Amino acid sequence: MDMDGKRLTHLDEEDRLKMVDVGDKERTDRAARVRGEICMEPETAALIAQNRVAKGNVLEAARLAGIMAAKRTGDLIPLCHPLNITAVDIEFTLKSDRVEVEAQARINDRTGVEMEALTAATIALLTIYDMCKGVDRSMVISDVRLMEKRGGQSGVYQRSE
């Protein structure tokens, strides 16, 4: 059951998993925005800022990985619909001891893109970890969360933060 006392959409009447049928829904413009961060030693952040990490340009590799992952979300998460995403944008804010990631996915379709934005942000963060683990194994990925969702029957969701 969900918070309103209704059944979860991925379960049938006998509690068996099912893919939600979105065939009767109208196509609408939809977007989702997600944030997350990876904390690290200040020396690691400095290496990223100076583009001196041995594996290459950390943020551009993370951007590409996040975009590619968003496009493959339907292959990674069971029961998630494969979507033709129209855009994925990933931005980074480099601080003295962390990298903040914001991913946004957009589509004109019958289902939302929250999972694609969450996947993009998470894989971008994992890529940063992978590229920097040789100099800093103490990094911590945290606070991956949906900030905003637009479109569809449920309308607008905006995190108050």
Image (cartoon, rainbow, N blue to C red):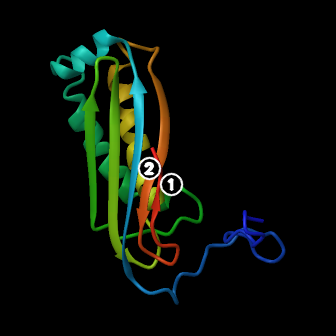
Which residue is the extreme one toward the front?
160
What mark, if any, has residue 20 been given in the picture?
A: none
Would you place residue 140 above or below residue 64 in this image?
Answer: above
Q: CA distance from mark 1 to mark 2?
A: 9 Å
Q: Residue at x 49, y 32 (%)?
A: 142
What mark, if any, has residue 76 been given in the picture?
A: 1
Which residue is the extreme one toward the left?
50
Report the amino acid beneath label 1. Answer: Leu
Mark in the foreground, 1 or 2: 2
Camera-side residue of 118 and 4: 4
Q: Quadrant of residue 62?
A: top left
Report the amino acid beneath label 2. Answer: Thr
Which residue is the extreme one toward the bottom?
24
Would you place residue 150 above or below residue 104 in this image?
Answer: below
Q: Secondary structure at mark 2?
A: helix
Task: Tally the numbered discs.
Answer: 2
Q: Residue at x 26, y 62 (%)?
A: 87
Q: Quadrant of the C terminus?
A: top left
User: Would you say 33 lies left or right of 153 here?
Assistant: left
User: Would you say 96 lies left or right of 28 here?
Assistant: left
Where is residue 35 drawn, in percent x and y?
40, 43
Where is residue 100 drawn, in percent x and y?
34, 33
Camera-side residue of 118 and 160: 160
Q: Residue at x 52, y 90 (%)?
A: 24
Circle 1 residues within 10 Å: few <14, some 14–19, many ≥20: few
Q: Quadrant of residue 27?
A: bottom left
Q: Secondary structure at mark 1?
A: helix
